[in-house]
Amino acid sequence: MTLDEILDNFALLDDWDDRYRYIIELGRTLEPLPEADHVEANKVQGCASQVWLTTAVRPDGAGGPVLSFKGDSDAHIVRGLIAILFSLYSDKNAREILAAEPTTIFEKLGLKDHLTPQRSNGLKSMVARIRRDAEAALATSE
């Protein structure tokens, strides 16, 4: 699902219970993360739920390396948040990832006002991890 599709679908849902259900549905669309990747090295620190994230990097010439992500969580709503993040970041080059401003997207979706402080902190931790991976990929490509 693209970020634009997610934004359009959110705009159609007036009730936050429906939006939460939609976020959970987005989480069900994530490609399964192999059990072998549910290890401490892939765990995102700072999340109340357990979150695992893997990053694949492929070179892409002048645009810099392209990163794709897989992830999982033991919480349904968090899996949906991961899906939203992947629509913003996955299969983008490192420079695009570092230039993306997720706060604007979260505000458009209303997530800033409707997530618990713990979930918001977890979301920030996931973004920080993705950005660190993009910075590392860019540093090794230069």
Image (spheres, helix red, strand yellow):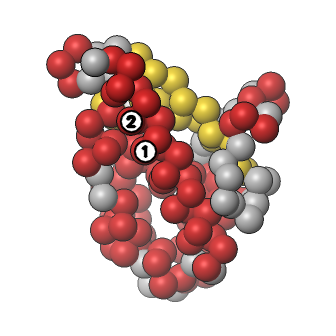
| Mark 1 lies on residue | 131
Q: Residue at x 43, y 30 (%)?
A: 136
Q: Secondary structure at mark 2?
A: helix
Residue 63 against residue 92 in the figure, above or below: above
The answer to whether residue 72 of the structure is visible from this angle is no
Instruction: Point out residue 102 in the picture as x, y percentages from the top left corner.
Output: 36, 60
- Left or right: 43 as drawn, with respect to 88: right
Residue 89 versus residue 136: which sits nearer the camera?
136
Q: Which element is circle 1 on? A: helix
Q: Residues within 10 Å of mark 2 (few under 14, many from 20)?
A: some
Residue hosting label 2: 135
Single out the residue that lies furthest toward the left: 62
Tell me the CA gap for discs 1 and 2.
Answer: 6 Å
Three-letter amino acid code at disc 2? Glu
Q: Quadrant of the C terminus?
A: top left
Residue placed at 52% from the left, 34% from the top? 69
- Percent across and percent down for residue 84 are 48, 54
Kindly identify the amino acid type of the residue bearing the numbered disc 1: Arg
Q: Residues within 10 Å of mark 1 (few under 14, many from 20)?
A: some
The image quarter in which residue 122 lies: bottom right
Residue at 81 percent across and 30 percent down: it is: 35
The location of residue 85, given as percent across then percent down, is: 47, 51
Q: Is residue 70 left or right of residue 110?
A: right
Q: Let me know if residue 131 appears in the view.
A: yes
Residue 108's disc is none
98 or 81: which is nearer to us? 98
Q: Which one is nearer the viewer's eye here, 54 or 79?
A: 54
Placement of 74 over or under 107, stated as above or below: above
Q: Are marks 1 and 2 in contact (CB under 8 Å)?
A: yes
Q: Is residue 64 above or below residue 112?
A: above
Q: How many marks?
A: 2
The location of residue 94, given as percent across then percent down, is 33, 33
